[in-house]
Image (cartoon, grey):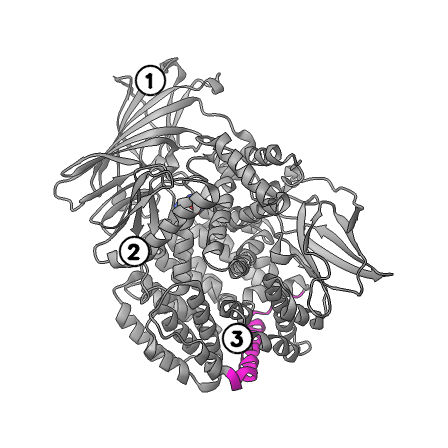
Amino acid sequence: MTADHSSPAANAGSDPAADPRPADPRTVWLSDYRPFSHLLDRVELTFRLAPRRTKVAARLHLRPNPAARGQHVLRLDGEDLRLISLKLDGTVLDLTPDETGLTIPGDLLPNGPFTLETLVEIDPADNTALEGLYMSNGMYCTQCEAQGFRKITFCPDRPDVMARFHVRVEADAAADLPVLLSNGNPVAAGAGWAEWDDPWPKPTYLFALVAGDLVAHRAPFTTKSGRSVDLAIWVRPGDQDRCAWAMDSLIRSMQWDEKVYGREYDLDTFNIVAVDDFNMGAMENKGLNIFNSKFVLASPETATDDDFARIEAIIAHEYFHNWTGNRITCRDWFQLCLKEGLTVFRDQQFSGDMRSHAVKRIEDVALLRARQFREDQGPLAHPVRPESFVEINNFYTATVYEKGAELIRMLKVLVGDAAYAGAIDLYFSRHDGEAATIEDWLKVFEDATGRDLSRFARWYSEAGTPRLNLTETWENGRYSLTFRQHTPATPGQRHKSPKVIPIAIGLLNADGSEAIPPQVLEMTEAQQSFHFDGLAARPVPSILRGFSAPVVLERIATAEERAFLLAHDSDLFNRYESGRALAREMLTGLARGQGDLLAGWIAALAPVIRDQALDPAFRALVLRLPGEDDIAQALHDQGVPPDPDRVHAARKEAGLALARALAPDLDALIAALHDSGPFAPDAAGAGRRALSNALLALLSRLDGGEAARAAFKDANNMTATTGALVALLDIGGAEPELAQFASRWAGDRNVMDKWFMLQIACAAPARVAGLVADLTRRPDFDLKNPNRFRAVFGALSAHHAGFHRADGSGYRLLADWLLQLDPLNPQTAARLSTAFETWPRYDEARQHLIRTELSRILDAPGLSRDLSEMAGRMLAAG
Ligand code: TRP
Ligand code: ZN
């Protein structure tokens, strides 16, 4: 193979001058980074817990930072704190904090080491934002990432200020709080108190404290060098029999990180606590991970296979942060992808090793496209390493996490596995104990491999999803592939430059065999051709195998060729991809009322579904129709504003046609997947159940739900239960089953979230808004519980045709509730506002309706910084 390129190298990158957004005075800029004025050697904290008035005494051991000479004042962050006393080296200072902190004037500050003591009072019972110290179900817990520590005590609250922490927790004798936890190792405890010491310097965002009436599910662990660690998962009494899977996942994660990355655990204890009220999935606090209970608790009766897989992945993710995040942390929040992208990549590798790499990759790419591509193609697009933010909590995004992981994956493909391992070792040895940057990360790869990564670095600074266009020629025995790349403009970044794109390919002979050894083409220019000589006949190309780069591949191919690849490609990802392309073309055709590609699609798909030699998990994925949001985006890409009702109808029509085509085989196919033994949450069983549920949903379209009703009665695990329930909800006949489910699980918040979510997800478009309104009137709808709020309003937003009703009822309902939630929990309100990010896709009437709601939100008095930044950014791109 030979390569040539011809490209006018476009001008690079970001051009703030072209940014149409008016500068928000609250904006924080990467370019403004300065080292902190002081070094913080040690933090001693004493908590006297009380629901409405917890006292926090802090002693900070500080000294001037030699790297920050010339900065004379000491600025401590602090919000919503009642300052009781302040002393510097034992002398009382009479200073008054402002809204965001406390400034100690330079003339009061010693030139050498000194201690600063504060006593503050805070109100955890009133903390509905779930940031800082708060209460959930009678227990105390904390969430400090990103900037929650400043709601606990006055302190420099930034990740490059790292300190050793010693913590004393005291509970009132009358309070029922037998378990008192913090980071590090336990050093002493008595009745109503405990002390913890963390030997590893850490930033404030990794601080954690938990106090409550909890029970432990314990296990011992011995690290590869022989150190013993006490593992414990802490839950409310009654939940201890639902911890085994999380513990098993933790042990496998610890072993995997030793084996694959050579990373050992570094404390005597590792604690995980499950809490019901939590804004995100989980948090990697040093030695004391705090989890949303839905990502810890699992039993076959209460958790689906997807839940089991997610628990395994999130336990691994938080554990892996101990090295990628905690031992090596971020210099500032702009570097968030340094820990998140790498840790997501590591958890993806782990899940692939535990299960199936091909299935995991297909699922990860589906998520990347559904969330990250959507974000990258709309008004909220931002680089993997953003250059500014108003509220950092708004940047825990699919771009930082998922695209961040893709960049690491590409690096690994480009340098190769051995060089990747060498670079990672260098990263750990060079930066252990430091707060690092993306430049540090890339430098490690440059030093370890001798490669120049300056062009690769553009992936971190430029937003937007590159479009990769391909043309092929076959002339005189020479086969040529010509690629052109182009990244559309994103808010604030009009001009984009060519990216380094690893393109994994294969060329197939007519019998499906490989005509050349599979290889990775390295594209670096705007346009580039690759030539292949010596082929006997024109091959069928399999491009972007394994989804080797996060780009949109624009390749026109015939349906015959797609069907050929679906049947024959040796790369399972591209087999799936060909099926997906066929389905998209068929569905957009139906939605546009053009042509009928149903028969061709079914003819290509049915043999794969019937092929019992193929992994059922893979067949289930092939069977899954592209979602309505995905079809809407495809229509938009074709230059047509999507009509949500027609998209919905097209998807229904295709499902029914497929059901009819498979009808003679459905019973036998389902029967062949039947599991007799006890439930096990392994990948093979999960694959069989996924396929069985998908086929059951098809069968219900034909038999009026008879088989699904029987399956619901027989179900002995939550995957089977929800599979049958969804099949019935889809055909509009699940009233008795919904009632049974609700009466059986009324006492279980996590299971009831499924009940709320599924009935909205499956409702007819015209019923969605009314159903959501009804469900919010139930006494068990709790605005303060993020899981419940997300179950209801996440389902509303994800119901494409229901949310995008032409009368605007979906938009109005969501906006009303975001405005209600915002004063209580701005972080969660802001996150759910991304439902509106796709507005530029739709017709003018819908655009107007959405923009009206966004303006109504933006104009609301007292709106949070979180939600105002989001609404403002979505409106600005107009
Ligand atoms: N660092 C956490 C993770 O990725 C994310 C997280 C948990 C978080 N809680 C948060 C981020 C609150 C922002 C705010 O595992
Ligand atoms: Zn993380």
Give the crowd class for mark 3: few <14, some 14-19, many >=20 residues within 10 Å: few
Question: Pointers 2 and 3 in contact (CB under 8 A)?
Answer: no
Visible residue check, residue 172 = yes
Quarter-wise, where is residue 770 in the image? Answer: bottom left
Residue closest to the eye, 453 or 516: 516
Q: Nearer the viewer, residue 432 or 404?
A: 432
For badge 2, the amino acid type reads Cys
**Badge 1 density bin: few <14, some 14–19, many ≥20, Cα 10 Å:** some
Label 1 CB-ligand 1 distance < 8 A = no
Can you tell which mark lies on residue 114?
1
Residue type at mark 3?
A: Gln
Q: Report the side of 288 relative to 471 (left or right).
A: left
Instruction: State the residue position of label 2.
Output: 243
- Asked if ligand 2 lies within 8 A of label 3, the reply is no
The residues tagged by marks 1 and 2 sit, at their Cα atoms, a distance apart of 45 Å
Residue 223 placement (x, y as % from top left)? 36, 41
Q: CA distance from mark 2 to mark 3?
A: 35 Å
Q: Verify CB contact (< 8 Å) between mark 3 and mark 1.
A: no
